[in-house]
Image (tube, grey):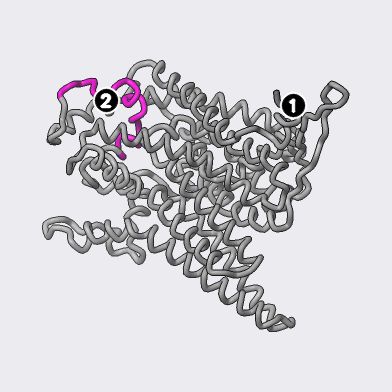
Amino acid sequence: MKSPTAQCQGGPRNPIIRLIAYFVAWKLLLLGVALLSPGPGYDTSTGLLQYMDASSPNHRCSTNYLGPLAGKLVRWDGIYYTQIARRGYSFEQEWAFGWGHTRALSLVSRRAAGSSMAAIDAIAATGIIIAHACHLFSVLAMYQLTLSVWSEVAFQKLRNFAFLSATLHIISPAGLFLSAPYAESPFALLNFAGLYFYSQSYRQHLLKPTLLSACLMLSSGCTFGVATMFRGNGLLSGTVFVYDALETLSVLLRTISTSITHCEVANAVQRLAITGLSGLLMACIALFPQYVAYTELCLEAPSNMTRRPWCDSTIPSIYAWVQKEYWGVGFLRYWTISNQPLFLIATPMLIVIYLSGKWAWEGEHTRTRLTRVVDTEHEGGLTIQCDTIRGSPLDHAILRRFAVSQIILGLLAFTTYHVQIITRLSSGYPVWYWWLASLIISGNDANLWGWRFNIPRWITRWMVVYAFIQGALFASFLPPA
C-alpha cells in the first residue's frame, strides 16, 4: 500500500486521466440538463432543417431523425453552421460565420458519409463530436500551456496550478456552447496551441536563437491564422507579434545611445524578421476567407447581380460589412435600453477580464503566494507542509503579451460586440483561468475598487450556476445566446 506521501506528493496523481474523468462527468451533467430542458422553445428552426435537406441524396423522411440530443444542441448559430456546411454560403449574411469551421464540418461529414453531400443529421452529429473532442483537447492543451508559461517554477510545485487551471476551463461559463456545433471549442484548442508554440519560441530564443525557435514562432502564426478562420476574434492573438516587434525595435533604437554588441543586434534583427514573417503568415491565412468571398461575390458575380457596396471599400471585407449591416455590430450600437439586461449578464465576465488583465499586466503574479499543500507522514499521523510558487520576470514578460488580447477583447465586447457573447468568447483565453487558479490556491481575497471579496468562491459558483441555467435556456432555444 502506498504511503500518504507517495499519494499526495507533487499534486494530483495521473492529472491527465483525472482531467478526462472530470471532463466526462461535467459533460454528462450539462447534456443531462439539455435533454431535460422543456420543449423546442419559441423558435422551431431546428425542426425545419430536415425539410431543407430534401434535395440531399441521403435525405431521410423521419421527422425526428436528428434525435433528442442533437435537436437540443443544434440551436441559434448552430443552425447556420450546419446549413452552410451542407450547401455552402448562399446568403451574404452567412459570411459572419467562420469559414474555417463550416469547411471543417463539411469535409469531415462528407468523408464520414462517403458522399459529395452529407445529410443534415450527419453534419449535426459531426459538429457535436468535433465540439466535444476539441474541448477535451483544449483542456489538455491548457494544462501543457500552463506548464510551459510557468516553467520557471519547479515542476512538482506547478502541477497543482496547471491541473486547477485546466479544470477551470472544463467548467468554463461558455457551458453548452462548447458542446454544440459552434466554433468556440475548436477556437480554444487552436488559440491555446498557438500560445504554446509562442511561449516555447520565446523561451528558446532568449536561451539561444535557433532554427527551432524560429519554426515555433512561425507555427504560432500559422495556428493563430487558422484560429481566426474559425472565429474572427482570433485576430487579436496577433497582438503578441505586435508587442514583440515594438519591443525589438526599442532594443535596436537603443543602439544609437548605448553600447550593444553586434551579436545582440543580429539577434534583435533576426527576431524582428521572424516576428514580422509570423504575423504576415497569420494575416494571409486569416484573410483567405475574405479573398474567397471577394472573388465569388465581387469579381465573379453574375452580371445581373447588383454589385455589393463592400466590394468597393478601401478594405473590402465581407465580414466587417455583414457584422455591421446584418448583425448590428458597431461602436456603442448595442448600448440601448432594451439591451441593459444583457450587459448585466456579461458584467461578471467583464470584471474577471479586467481584474485578471490588470493582474497579468502589472506583474501581480510575481508577488502572489501560491500555496502547495503536501501531506507527509509524521509519527503515524499527517502534517501539513506549505511551499510557495512565485512567477518570474520571464513569466511576467509572456503573461503581459497574452494579457493584451484578452484586455482588448473585453473592451470590444463592452463597446462594440453583442456584449453577452463575452461569456463564451472568453473561453479561449488563458490569463483569467490562471488568475482565478492563483486566487483559489493562495486563498487570498481580491481588491475591487477598494472593496475586498472572496472572489474565487463567488466566481466558481457563478460559473457552475450560469453554465446550468444557460444550458437549459440554450437547449430550449431561449436567449441569451
In three-dimensional space, the C-alpha distance between marks 2 and 1, rounded to whole angstroms, equals 51 Å
Q: Which residues are magenta?
A: 61-81
Task: Say which of 244 and 192 sits in front.
Answer: 192
Residue drawn at (27%, 60%) of the image: 294
Image coords of residue 231 (percent x, y): 41, 48
Image coords of residue 55 (percent x, y): 12, 35
Q: Which image quarter is the N terminus in? A: top right
Q: Residue flagged by tag 1: what amino acid is it?
A: Ser
Q: Residues within 10 Å of mark 1 (few under 14, many from 20)?
A: few
Q: Residues within 10 Å of mark 2 (few under 14, many from 20)?
A: many
Residue drawn at (20%, 43%) of the image: 87
Image coords of residue 461 (percent x, y): 62, 26
**Residue that lies at the very extreme toward the right in this rendered image:** 379
Q: Is residue 262 above or below residue 181?
A: below
Q: Is residue 392 above or below residue 434?
A: below
Residue for badge 2: 66
Residue for badge 1: 3
The answer, for residue 451, to whether it is visible in the render is: no
Task: Say which of 322 and 440 sits in front.
Answer: 440
